[in-house]
Amino acid sequence: MKVLLFGATGMVGQGVLRECLLDPGVELVQTVGRTAAPVQHAKLRQVVHADLMDYGPIEAALEGFDACFWCLGVTSAGMSEAAYERVTYGITMAAARTLARLNPGMTFVFVSGAGTDSTGRGRVMWARIKGKTENALLLLPFRAAYMFRPGVIEPVHGVKSKTGVYRWFYLLAKPLLPLARWAFPAHVLTTEEIGRAMLAVARNGAPKRVLESRDIRAILQQPAN
């Protein structure tokens, strides 16, 4: 399987990249972003591209992939609605429309979030825009598209958030997260588990196109093919 990964330098993306590189069934992982991930590996190829709204100059490098894992995202804190929509909806759709044309047999997996508003009309700005993005992705002519909506995410294996506020949160919450996972297993996932579930969905599909935390965990409990 050949995997395209966006957002490889973010917290979730770091975890997904690690799992892709460890998976013997993945022959190539190609990252796309404004900066390269600080990782070297025999099956890793990195494409640094400044304008994430325009993929014309690198289209040739985006063909021939079986799956795309979209882990690129920002926190809405301190952002205007227009700025957040440009990143969350605009950049995502610019890439996804290009990929659907170049790789119609691709499975596209989008990391959204718990609480996303599928109506696209709710009062919470980030949830409304995430919902709008999900809905648009599900209409594209991919072989399959899945929306991952994790709740609390525990970074493991040295993965760290790039966002300062989140880094402090995880530093303070680190002793409590394993307990939270034990007490609320349906609501807490590790970065490793998200990566493994993405790979499983790319290979075998899923019974739902929108997967909440408990659905993602259920994917991991299915026998591997």
Image (tube, helix red, strand yellow):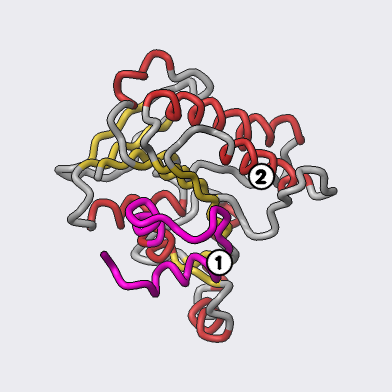
Magenta segment, which residues? 197-225
- Residue 114 is inside the magenta segment: no
Q: From the viewer's side, name the closer residue of 1 and 195.
A: 1
In the displayed structure, 188 sits above or below 144; it is below
Q: CA distance from mark 2 to mark 1?
A: 16 Å
Quarter residue 193 falls in = bottom left
Residue 215 colored in magenta in the image: yes
Percent position of residue 145, x then y: 49, 45
Q: Is residue 47 above or below residue 71?
A: above
Question: Which residue has dot 1 on it?
Answer: 213
Query: Can you see residue 15?
Result: no
Residue 29 image label? none
Residue located beneath label 2 in the image: 130
Number of residue marks:
2
Residue drawn at x 37%, y 53% as measured from the top left: 16
Image quarter where the N terminus lies is top left
Q: Residue at x 36, y 19 (%)?
A: 59
Residue 52, position as x, y percentages in the image? 49, 25
Residue nearest the viewer, comparing 114 with 216: 216
Q: Residue furthest right?
A: 123
